[in-house]
Image (tube, rainbow, N blue to C red):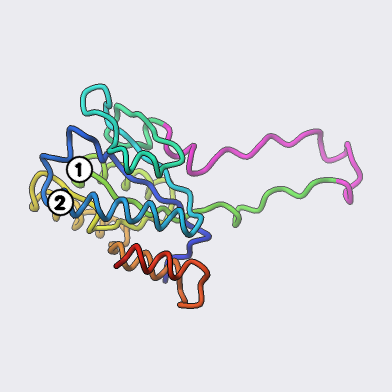
Amino acid sequence: MLLDADDCQLVLVDYQIRLMPALHDSAAVIANAVRLARLAEAMQVPCFGTEQNPAKLGENLPEIRALCQKTLAKMHFSACADGLVDWLRPPAPPQRGNARSLPKHLQKPQADDSEARSTIVVAGCESHVCLLQTVLDLLDEEFDVWVVTDACSSRTERSRDAAFDRLAGAGAELVTTEMVAFEWLRTADHPAFKTVQALIK
């Protein structure tokens, strides 16, 4: 199964100013997170950010925050506990009237569930805490979740790798930034190919 840009949303978890300097290989991780957000922009994939206790840890890095459509401030380690799912799966508007209020040919069709974007591409920090708990909750909410490993970090490699092992066992797909880019494109004929190629180089 390949990623489909039209079915995806991107979530960037906690790339915060006071957190990033303490994390393993943070410069490469930040570069890949920015790359993912720019890829999402080029491919018209919605992009959301989260910030853990921003009063203490600061906001997300400005280059990441600027590329997110919205950023969720949270206190729970899982962003789902503070409302992320409502952003990813907005509630359907209430149906007006009842089945008898209009002739059948005049009633508006209900939104098809297939129109919802059910695949969540996620990257973030720390891998073994906020990223892990957010992804496990997204899986419980029956989203398909793909974790971009080269855009994730923890203070230690051991914690990061343990998170990846646990997430893979729980059903998340593990990918890299370039895998996401080329699966979203699918073909060198895609109108965004040159833009994406420049981001990867």
Residue 176 lies in the magenta stretch = no
Residue 98 lies in the magenta stretch = yes
Q: Nearer the viewer, residue 149 or 187?
A: 187
Say if 185 sits above or below 65 in the image.
Answer: below
Seen at 19% across and 55% down, the residue is: 28
Quote the CA–CA distance across marks 1 and 2: 8 Å
Q: Secondary structure at mark 1?
A: loop
Seen at 10% across and 40% down, the residue is: 22
Q: Main secondary structure of the magenta part?
A: loop
Q: Position of residue 185 (x, y in %)?
A: 45, 69
- Neighbours of disc 1 within 10 Å: few (<14), some (14-19), many (20+): many
Marks 1 and 2 close (CB-CB < 8 Å): yes
Left or right: where 198 falls relative to 61:
right
Q: Earlier in the sequence, mark 1 or mark 2?
A: 1
Q: Which residue range is magenta in the image?
A: 83-106
Tag 1: amino acid: Glu
Q: Which residue is mark 2?
A: 160
Seen at 47% across and 77% down, the residue is: 187
Q: Nearer the viewer, residue 69 or 72?
A: 69
Tag 2: amino acid: Arg
Q: Which residue is mark 1?
A: 126
